[in-house]
Amino acid sequence: MVYRDIVVLAAVLGSIGTLLADNPCLKGPPVAKNAAECCATPSLVEPSAFMACHSKWISQTKRQMTIEGIPRGCCVAECVMNSTNLYSDGKIDRDALTKLYLASAKPMAPEWKQIALDSIDGCFKMADSIKDEIEAGAKLTPAFDGEQICHPISGTILACMGMTLFGECPAKLFTVNDDCNKLKTYHSKCPFL
């Protein structure tokens, strides 16, 4: 992963909270295909654990994405991080996260080990570069009845990792077809929700 990709990703992630209702990220992917059908990437949790968090929090997350201003935390991501015991008091345990990604990458193609390590390094550097914005997001108050405020660090790291790993999928492992190409373009700008 090159520095330019990290800068672009930082700009994308910095704008998540300021998305407007007509933003294509809010509408979801342009195709019905699942990213794993195009390229299976290392992951932190089993799909069922992710889906449990997704089902619980996605309505709130989509509603938050229409709110302008400081990006709000993603409770889907915090739920995932909590399920792996990687998150505590606004901090992600980088060593434990690295171990989980490397364990997930181990049975996969050997290229994934270095891609995962580079992605982790890039995503933590990117998060550090916007730490003031992340901390400001953690101090927000609810904007609507029932809104849970989650710390933005989980969403920042998970969105970055998902987008980066998918974007860095080795050519020999990526399924080339119209739907997968559209999905790759979409996820180069929009996080996995």
Image (cartoon, grey):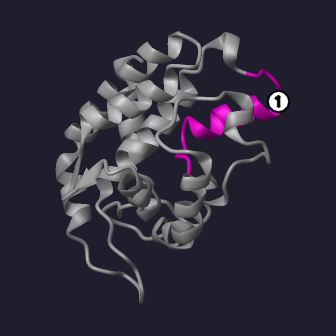
Magenta stretch, residue numbers: 175-193
Task: Report the amino acid beneath label 1.
Answer: Asp
The residue under the point 76% across, 22% down is 175
Say whether residue 151 is magenta: no
Residue 139 lies in what quarter of the image? bottom left
The residue under the point 68% across, 35% down is 36
Q: Is residue 182 above or below residue 54?
A: above
Q: Is residue 170 above or below residue 184?
A: above
Say whether residue 191 is magenta: yes
The residue under the point 30% across, 25% down is 121
Whole-percent x, y for residue 88 in the image: 22, 56
Q: How many marks?
A: 1
**Residue 7 appears in the picture as rendered:** no
Q: Quadrant of the C terminus?
A: bottom right
Whole-percent x, y for residue 130 in the image: 23, 44
Secondary structure of the residue carrying tag 1 is helix
Outermost residue, bottom side:
145
Q: Is residue 5 left or right of residue 112?
A: left
Outermost residue, right side:
178
Residue 180 lies in what quarter of the image? top right
The residue under the point 32% across, 72% down is 149
Q: Is residue 69 left or right of residue 180?
A: left
Q: Quadrant of the N terminus?
A: top left
**Residue 174 appears in the picture as rendered:** yes
Q: Report the front residue among 187 and 166.
A: 166
Residue 161 lies in what quarter of the image? top left
Whole-percent x, y for residue 8 in the image: 41, 32
Q: Report the front residue among 74 and 51.
A: 51
Whole-percent x, y for residue 15 in the image: 41, 52
Q: Report the front residue among 149 and 105.
A: 105
Q: Which residue is mark 1?
A: 178
